[in-house]
Image (cartoon, helix red, strand yellow):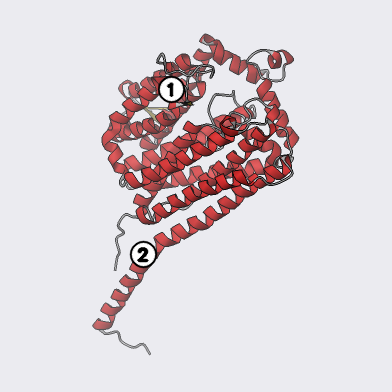
Amino acid sequence: MTTPTKPGDTAELKADTTVMKALRTLRMPQTQRNRELGLLLLAFAVSGSAVALVQLGALGGIEWTILYYFGALAVLVLTLHIVLRFRAPNADPIVVPIATTLTGLGLAMIYRIDIAIDAEGWDAASTRQIAWTAIAVAGAVLLVVLLRNYRVLFRYTYVSGFVGLILLILPVIPGLAAEGTGAAVWVSIGGLFTFQPAELAKIALAIFFAGYLVRTRESMTSTGHRFLGMTWPRAREIGPLLIIWVVSLAIIVLQRDLGTGVLIFGMFIAMLYTATGRTSWVLIGLGLAVAGVFIASQVMTYVGSRISAWWHAFDPEVIARDGGSYQLVEGIFGLAQGGLVGTGLGQGRPYLTPLSQSDYIVPSLGEELGLIGLFAILCLYMLFVSRGIRIGLAGQDDFGKLLATGLAFTIALQVFIMVGGVTRLIPLTGLTTPFLAAGGSSLVANWLIVALFLRVSDAVRSRPRVVIG
């Protein structure tokens, strides 16, 4: 027999339900941050163990100085974690541990190569990388603290585009370009240190693309012509795409930097597809990319030699010539030496490959960690990118959705270009592998992307929820 419910009981039941929902809402941010803390402790353990194994394998003992430096970096990352607890409690709990793990593994391998070549002090790439890591994490902390609402960036759409273009042309300004660095992509500050402005330019341009597409998406999606089962844009809507294509070609021609040109154009195409949902834009973009690379390969000997070194990599003449495929072949031999499980940290010979700390950091890790270890690293990248795309798809507004998705795709494309280049899947370009490779400007830019992910994800999860009943 059912006991009848009084009106007062119903009101009390609804009040209790509301209180329970409120308590669950309050506990959720702390649960996210506790999960992040647990994953960070695991990331510290993986990074510290990697350095210890490098020392045991290469030196036969433990040198505590480098571990103290790693401990200081761990304190900085924990500072970011504490800031998130108070300033962005609903931020994604996965991206910081992944970035920390990748950065730690990259530092361990850079340090391992420094041991092999007897580099010490500031001449050691690992010392500079530790300093840049501290700057990068501190920059992420500042961005999380100062940027309370990422939507503010929408107001500076065209300012960001201008800043991005200025950063791209800095290396070709007389007196600023760093000498002896190959492609004209580096800027020297007072002769003390160099940085690559294109790494920061990709963030500024992502903000510009997101803001521009939010303003113009209606005209790009509401008009067009049907052909072959798809809606193709009119000529006037193709104008911005052609402008970005010309800018990308100009980067390739003026700076001899195929990687940055492809990266910026690919980022714009991905954000354009996200904004419009039209496959025709992707097909047009791919056609323009192929045409641009073909034109560059015919006009510029630099691009042509890169393609020739890729296509005829194992030709003895190509290996021996200046700017040939020697690095590529050495990297492939290193991967083959690593096999399935690797030679072990500190026990391989990755230093035989030129630029093993920067452009060829992936073959260096593959040689000592093996195919299994390399797949684990690629899985970390896949998870990082998927979290970024998830943050974008859950965005409250079109600007946040495009910004997070564009930045996630940029990381994915950069990883694909570098891993595909060193494994001879595609021609090699002059980019850096995110978080892993030696390079301060790249590290700073990638940690700023982490901070933007944190801000957007916190805004998504903090939005008011409608309670029914």
Rendered-image quadrant of the N terminus: bottom left
Mark 2 or mark 1: which is in front? 1
Q: Is disc 1 placed on a helix, strand or loop?
A: loop
What label does residue 26 carry, if any?
2
Name the residue: 40% across, 20% down. Answer: 170
Q: What residue type is labelled 2?
A: Leu
434 to the left or right of 274? right
Percent coordinates x, y for residue 456 in the rendering:
37, 46
> Few, some or many C-alpha atoms within 10 Å of disc 2 (few <14, some 14-19, many ≥20)?
few
| 368, 179: nearer the viewer | 179
Instruction: Judge whether residue 99 can be spotted in this image.
Output: yes
For residue 126, side relative to residue 272 (left or right):
right
Q: In which quarter of the image is residue 221?
A: top left
Along the viewing direction, whichever of 156 and 196 lies nearer the viewer: 196
Rendered position, 167 above or below 468? above
- Kind of residue sitting beneath label 1: Gly
Instruction: Please tell me how crowded label 1 is: few (under 14), some (14-19), or many (20+) other residues with Cα within 10 Å.
Output: few
Q: How many labels does the image show?
A: 2
Side (left or right) of 5 relative to 47: left
| Quadrant including the C terminus | bottom left
Residue 342 visible to an observer of this rendering: no
Residue at image coords 67%, 37%:
366
The image shows residue 183 at horizontal and vertical percentages of: 51, 18
Q: Earlier in the sequence, mark 2 or mark 1?
A: 2
Query: Dividing the picture into quarters, in which one does residue 275 lie?
Result: top left
Distance of mark 2 from mark 1, alpha carbons?
Answer: 51 Å
Residue, disc 1? 190
Residue 86 spot, x, y in % from top left? 36, 56
Q: In this view, does 262 lie to the left or right of 319?
A: left
Q: Which residue is drawn at 63% across and 42% down?
A: 375
